[in-house]
Image (cartoon, rainbow, N blue to C red):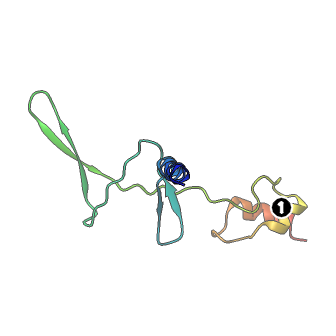
Amino acid sequence: MSKYLSVIVAMMIASTAAAQDVIYYEDGTAYTLKEGERIFISKTGKMYKKRAYKNGNVFFTNVTPNDKVDPEESPTDGMEKGSEEWCEAYVPYQWGYTFDDQLYERACKD
């Protein structure tokens, strides 16, 4: 019994170590951290990077926030734009008026 328990614990540790860190934002988007990428959290909104030089000078530079998000899968991914299948699956004007909306108007509206 203890042999199986140790195998289960080892599998749980291995799966936790292989898991990727993901940040979920309030608007429903997410960002997956790349290997070796670190995050820092600030309540003030101001972050600085320290750079020390051999001559004794120290400089601080402002670090801008990361606004990257993971690309979202679309129901039209992999389809040929303008095809009948694409026209049925495409949702027009959800991001304002885009190039795809223009194609939708030309190819899909009768």
Quarter of the picture holding the C terminus? bottom right
Residue 3 appears left or right of 110: left
Looking at this view, name the residue that lies furthest to the front.
1
Judging from the image, what secondary structure is the residue with disc 1 in? Answer: helix
- In depth, the one of 82 and 9 nearer the eye is 9
Quarter of the picture holding the N terminus? bottom right
Where does residue 23 sit, x and y in percent of width and height?
46, 60
- In depth, the one of 36 and 8 nearer the eye is 8
Question: Vertical placement of 83 versus 96: above or below?
Answer: above
Residue 32 appears left or right of 100: left
Where is residue 59, by image quadrant? top left
Q: Amino acid at mark 1?
A: Trp
Question: Vertical placement of 32 versus 95: above or below?
Answer: above
Circle 1: is it few (<14), some (14-19), or many (20+) Cα within 10 Å?
some
Residue 85 appears left or right of 62: right
Residue annotated with mark 1: 86
